[in-house]
Amino acid sequence: MKEVDLRVEQVFTEAYRDTAREFEGVFSRLFPGGEGRLVLTDPDNMLTTGVEVEARPPGKKVKRLSLLSGGERSLTAVALLVSIFKARPSPFYVMDEVEAALDDTNLQRLIGLMRELQESSQLIVITHQKRTMEVADALYGVSMQGDGVSKVISQRLR
């Protein structure tokens, strides 16, 4: 048990450090002039600690996520996801309408990060946003025909 605990602690510590480093960079890109960081609730006990997200968009003194707007919370969550993706890369990622609450400016910043992720991984993004679709290599859609039967439509863009 002690060996397993030591290994879990080592793996978690490395993953936390990598993700925390990435989060600061990703957050500052999504919120230019803002600051975000990940903080351990009990750094002396890595086996039971929690991780808190501190987010301070530019021009705000707020740290608690509950005090942010819906779009800011959504973008902060996306920053955390992308940070995990960058810290521990995977061959593909699935995202379901992650940009639904974003305005045009924030959507453009997120699309920039998606383009970076596309370089090393395959992204499967469910979206209704035309601007997000424009970044895709292929589009798949489901359309309901007049007879009530669904039809899958696909289009390769590149």
Image (tube, rainbow, N blue to C red):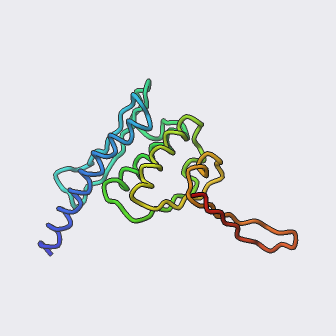
In-front residue for pair 150/136: 136
Residue pushed farthest left? 2
Extreme residue in the top direction: 59
Asked whether 69 or 83 is in front, the reply is: 83
From the viewer's side, name the closer residue of 156 and 75: 156
Residue sitting farthest toward the front: 158
Residue 142 coordinates in the image, percent (x, y)? 71, 66
Q: In the rendered view, tell whether residue 52 sits above or below residue 137.
A: above
At horizontal 18% and vertical 56% (from top left) the residue drawn is 45
- Residue under the image location 57 percent in, 41 percent down: 102
Task: Classify residue 49 as left or right of residue 54.
Answer: left
The percent position of residue 86, horizontal first and vertical second, equals 34, 53
* Residue 103 horizontal side relative to residue 64, left or right: right
| Drawn side of residue 116 relative to residue 151, left or right | left
Residue 88, x across and y down, in percent: 31, 59
Query: Residue at image x 52%, y 58%?
Result: 95
* Front residue of 42 and 135: 135
Q: Residue at x 39, y 28 (%)?
A: 33
Asked which quadrant contains residue 143, the reply is bottom right
User: Which image quarter is the N terminus in?
Assistant: bottom left
Q: Give the vertical position of 113 relative to 141 (above or below).
A: above
| Quadrant where the C terminus is found in the figure | bottom right
